[in-house]
Image: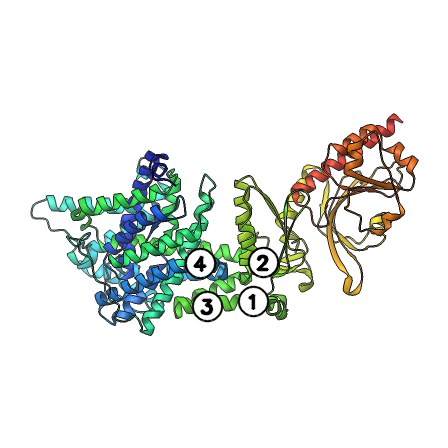
Amino acid sequence: MTLKTFFNDNLAKNIFAGLVVSLIALPLGLGLALASGAPPVAGVIAAIVGGIVVSILGGSHVTIAGPGNGLVVAVLGAITVLGQGDIYQGYLYTLAAIIISGAFIAILAFVNLGKLSNFFPGSAIQGMLAAIGIIILSKQFHIMVGNLEASGSPLELLLSIPKSVISCFTDSSKHAAGIAGVSSLLIMVFYSRIRNKYFQLVPAPMWIVLISIALAKIYESRAGVVHPISEEYLVSIPDNVLSSFPRPDFSKVLNADFLMAVFTITLIASIESLLSIKAIDKLDPRRRQSQVNKDLKALGLATVISGFLGGLNVVTVIARSSVNVNNNASNRSANFFHAAFLVVFILLFKEQLEYIPFPALAAILVYTGYKLASPAILKKISDIGREQLLIFLVTLVTTLLTSLIIGIATGIVTTILVHAVLTKNVKLFFHNFTTDNIETFNEEDGKLHITVKHFSSFVNFFRLKSVIDKVKTSDRVVVDFLQCQFVDHTVMENLWDYEQIFDKNGGEFEVVGLDLHSAESSHPFALRRALKFVPFVKTESQTKRQRAIAEFMEDKNWNFSIANDYHMFFLRDFDYFKTRQVDHLYNIGQDKKKVFKLFDIEYSEGAFILEEELHATMLYINTGKKIPAFTLDKGDFYERIQYLSAYKEIKFKSFRDFARRFTLRGENIRGIRRFFTDELVLFFESNNYYHLESNGKGGLLIMDKERHSGVGEIKGMVDFGIRLAALIEKEHKQK
């Protein structure tokens, strides 16, 4: 993006979006720094530096950079452990850890740090984030009701909340602070229910700031009236905040606690940024995709600068970014303007900002913590599958009892163990862990066909992702899991995201081959296991493809069943199956008159070590007419099939294009020529290629490719078959 484009592309909209975001970023920056144990202005510094640096050097389009929710616990832990009772000295040590963390993020981005996000199972990350939410809430609730001295583990803090609430009622010195905190929480809770467009021009956190300042001014203007909230509860901002900065202390750089702090901050910052970038790309109305590693380099550099200036880590933040999108931001300049407005606020309104009480900021964080760990998240995880709920809860509880690193590590190990138990096949994972399980080829119609083998989970998803990421989102892709025995929740969720991205950009992304897999629930993100691992398939656990086919069948007024069908005698007279062994049919759709039968089929060719299991989607038409046996195909598609060598190829000299594009074979040459009228030949010339075969008894078999057809392909095949049957009926009546 050129500098001219940067400022000229919808300049007014980007300035307005930047202003609205800054109204949220100011109180959040102050509050997140407070929750982290750092000076309140540290959060605003991170937002200013992030907004400037990432807007100029970043690779995203509409994201906002600043201090993140997820890092509160990591930074607070670092300040507490490294300071050993001296909070300010711990803050200086932590600034050094933040600087080194930023350098690591920038360096790792050069070696494709984006891949790391694939190695964390989705439910474990959700569990870690929920634990962070509970930790934030457990500490900030006490501050919200006026208790600044509360300390202890997250569980101890949660259990002592009633004591702080009682103290707020009984200690008169805490009354005003408690009222400010609880009132602010009520604003956060009920803000969205006030559907007034003028009221909602100002975000809820900024209403808290404005009301706090207004009340303070009212007390100040009335002679003889003292502000009811004591100074210990009010924000303090240094006079030379943007000119005199603290000095980070690197003296503990080789200390084990320091190195653990660096590792924890780096890990959480990376995960939070990667998740946020991915989420905001889905919201971009222009359907652009971020250059993730370029953005991480900019975030790393911004973190280094922020640390030297006394600020917190700089990450991509999802809530502020979504507000940016909702206010019609079009490029990174909105991030720049949000930083510029924060500078203006700090320079011009420093005195007013010092009227903001800590309990009011704590209320914002209590609400934030609740949103991270709300019961709705528990239900959402449970809906995906009971095994995901187990992973989520194990990660959450372990994180609360130990640390962020131990918590996420336990979540990863738990996920691996759950996968092994579900499949009852440990060898599947360990024998194929280092195997490249991805094969690709371009189909004749231009689609990229991606075959996934063995298993696909968070530990090897990067292989599939690297292939998909090389494809333009306007292209057509089929991901086939027929040869894959296990697909986990993280992969299913990522595939869903790809479907949305391709669909937005005019491409086509279809997942096939999962119809022979069982799912723990009907949720589209539920993990999938090959049927040989489980005794039956739950009908409520249909795949997205099955549900789409069922809807299509309903629209056609056809019956549809996913149950296996072993009545396959109607196929035995087709030459295609004379050398192939049919196992069963499934996903069967049939019209009321039983003229058309659409089905997926499992069959095999070869034997013993040369046996190959195949799957396809076919359409059978019972014409009820006397039609000679023949096969119609495209060029060399069946050259390898020896049974066709016994058939004579039939040419139509008057239709050279048909003769060039199709191979027509059969024994009854005269009957076949009589059947292929001029109108029928023109029909085939003007439609898609299909393998078409007649069994000589009125039955026609249509097949596209030796794989499951996508829903769009099925619709095309059915339409082709219906029009072909109608044309045959018309020709028969004319004869």
Answer few, some or many: residues within 10 Å of disc 3's Cα (few below 14, many 20 plus, some between 14 and 19): some
Quadrant containing the N terminus in the rendered view: top left
Task: Tell which tag, 1 or 4, sits nearer the viewer.
Answer: 4
Q: Name the residue under label 4.
A: 113
- The first of marks 2 and 3 along the sequence is 3
Quadrant containing the C terminus in the rendered view: top right
In whole angstroms, how far apart are the C-alphas of marks 4 and 3? 18 Å
Vertical order, 141 against 348 (above or below): below
Q: Residue at x 26, y 53 (%)?
A: 45
- The first of marks 4 and 2 along the sequence is 4
Task: Tell which tag, 4 or 3, sits nearer the viewer.
Answer: 4
Q: Can residue 197 be seen in this view?
A: no
Residue 259 in which image quadrant? bottom left
Amino acid residing under circle 2: Leu
Answer few, some or many: residues within 10 Å of disc 1's Cα (few below 14, many 20 plus, some between 14 and 19): some
Q: Which mark is residue 409?
A: 3
Q: Can residue 280 be seen in this view?
A: yes
Q: What element carries label 1?
A: helix
Task: From the top left corner, tell me how far across and down residue 84 is, in percent.
Answer: 25, 72
Q: Which mark is residue 562?
A: none
In whole angstroms, how far apart are the C-alphas of marks 1 and 4? 27 Å
- The first of marks 1 and 4 along the sequence is 4
* Contact flag, marks 4 and 3 (Cβ < 8 Å): no
In whole angstroms, how far apart are the C-alphas of marks 3 and 1? 14 Å
Q: Mark 2 points at which residue?
A: 527
Amino acid residing under circle 1: Val
* Contact flag, marks 2 and 1 (Cβ < 8 Å): no
